[in-house]
Image (cartoon, coloured by chain):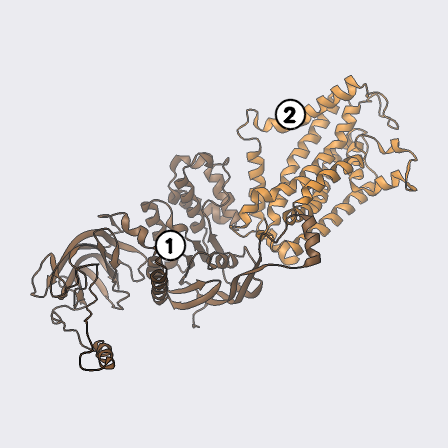
Chain colours: A orange, B brown
Amino acid sequence: MLTATDELWGYRALVQNLTNRQLKSQYKESLFGNLWSMINPAATIGVYSLVFGVLLKFGRNIPGIQYGDLQSFPLYLFCGIIMWSAFNRVAIGAMGTFTTTGSLLKKVYFPPAAPILAHALAQVKQTMLEGLIAMIVLSALGYFSWSFVLWPLLIPPIVIFSLGLGLMLTLANAYYKDVSYLMNIITMLLFYCTPILYSLERIGDAEIFGVKATTLLLLNPLTHFVAGSREMLYLGMAPSVTRWVAIWFSSFLSLALGWVVFVRYSKDVSEVV
Amino acid sequence: MSDGKMAIRADDVSKRFRLAHNRSEYLKEAIKRAERTEFTDFWALKNVSFEVEEGSMFGIIGHNGSGKSTLLRLLSNIYRPTTGKISTKGRISALLELGTGFHPQLSGRENIYLNASILGIPQKVIARRIDDIIAFADIGEFIDSPVKIYSSGMKVRLGFSVAVHVEPEILLLDEVVAVGDERFKRRCFEHIYELRRQGVTIVLVTHSLGQVQSLCDQAIWMERGEVREQGHAIDIARSYLQQVNITEAEAGFDGDLGDADLILEGRGERRGTGEITIEHVSFVNAHKAVTPFANSGRPLVVRIHYKAHQPIKNPSFALRFHTDSGTMVTAPNSRRGRINTGMVDGEGTIFYKIPRMHLTPGTYHLTAGVYDENNLHIFDQREREFELRVQPGSANDGEGYLDLGGQWAMPTGGSEEDVIEQGAAMGAERVDGVLDDRATAVGHDGAA
């Protein structure tokens, strides 16, 4: 375990270069280049506003949420969905890394975790940008809050949490291609099992199999990420200590488990990619 | 095995693969398979043991599918041995395929950093060597253009350049040096020579017996995943060739002997760095006359006139006899002849004495070359520049390229055993050396 960790550290130049490669080549040869990483989230806010604000007139009362005059469902949605997209890009997107760098593993030795880690790190920038856009839009509307400065603290744990799962998923997918198909369904389910389109408060006392639905939702680590992000951006408040503990605890658990499983089962991965 | 320090040690290494059609990529089948638990195992390597001495050059030969490439992948840590152990000492750079990991949208320079880091090279080493890498790859201003616009040759050069410039202690090469144009190939070998001189251990997987004989110290011959033979490169290449010939004769198979590709190209070409040059090649016949003609079955002395422009220690001289159609008939060289040429400087002559001209009448083309003592570095090589006409002489066999000098016999009077005994005794006969007094191993006629 320690050897594998040491080894990965020895290959940090590779991780760094793979990260750069992904960032540099991402929007290359497009007219707007890196602007796209800004345009995309901005367009997302635009589309949400159009659909939920203008067409569905969703804007006004978000049950259980009071935040001055800002009753904007599109922004409420966006502030939470940043965390979901980060998770999706890092954990689910990781499965694609072996299809691009997998053939390399057959030609030259390097730690197979390196491209997965690089992929995760490359997502930091996009998440950061999305947060920044949310902050800009909120500030422009007159809802600046000092809690904004706390928000970047969410990025390391969301990346760590997603990376842990991503390591296991990528490895499983290398052996059995079913995993990516299965994950399509699970991801969809997970999306609705995370309070993104709705607020936790909205659930009320609903029960599933005799257990309070809110309790179940609180066991989903993503709930804390999404809620935390929303609190710091949309609600202008610092998340509770319990929330931070839940966030960091689930992150470390995910990474520790992911790394142990990955190290244990990745030794012959070059034969199957 | 040897007293020297070992760079690579493979100890009873075996590698098993589960055959692809049996290894399911889908869970359903994996679950079904678990009930049956039957596997088709394929042992790509079986009980392979060898050692590679530090700073030496090691060749791996064998037919396709004999496990050569799997062995190289195990050495470079891409695969794990199923049983047994491989230990290596020093940083490994492997060149299993050129242009590994080039990203088409990134520039050549960016790809150098990426490629080198894939090889596990610290950034500071890359930064130190980047100018050398770019210079060697010879890509010019394109170095800052995206790699996707590169020609395949440029990609090959860039890939090779990175792999050899990252200061490896062990370099693993898989046939790659056979690619690229003649000029680049030469520079590759020059560089490999240079690395070797610096003490880098090199393992070369190749089909070219010529490369094994001229480059490698030790070699291993793989067959169906097992070590068929190992030892001195020259001996291994020889027995491998014998085996190929036997197999071919049995199967009537027109196979590739590895060197065939080298023969058809480059007639009249001259290459080398020129520290020693081949000035001329001349022939002296049995009547001690200088002549462009040889007589079949008669003695002939080939004289290679060289000029050393600086003192060179123990250079190796070589000749290659080619037929009109380009087939190489024989390729003697002084290193294989175990001749020590000593320190040479200035002009001089070296002789290759042929007691009986075994070539049948016809026109032959000779390549003459001079190399360093390991036959790695080419000082000068003149490809098929010298012509030798063999005229009918005492021998009668007119067809084919060789007259084996055999005699026909019938068991007249005596028994068959007598004939066989006579035949066996022929090997002991002394061949008369007409020019023995004149032809010495190395002539230092003009040498200072």
Mark carried by residue B192: 1
Q: Is residue B171 above or below residue B146?
A: below
Q: Secondary structure at mark 2?
A: helix
Q: Position of residue A145 (x, y in %)?
A: 78, 28
Residue in front for this viewpoint, A241 or A124: A124
- Name the kind of residue labelled 1 in the image: Ile
- Quarter of the picture containing the C terminus of chain B is bottom left
- Residue B239, given in percent of the width and then of the height, sits at 35, 66
- Please name the amino acid that badge 2 sits on: Ile
Residue contact between numbered discs 2 and 1, judged by CB atoms under 8 Å: no
Please give left or right for residue B92 compared with residue B325 in the image.
Answer: right
Q: Which mark is residue B231?
A: none
Labels 2 and 1 in the same subunit = no
- Write the residue at 34% across / 46% down: B184
Chain under label 1?
Answer: B
- Find numbered disc 1 in the image and state the secondary structure of the residue it sits on: helix
Name the residue tied to disc 2.
A39
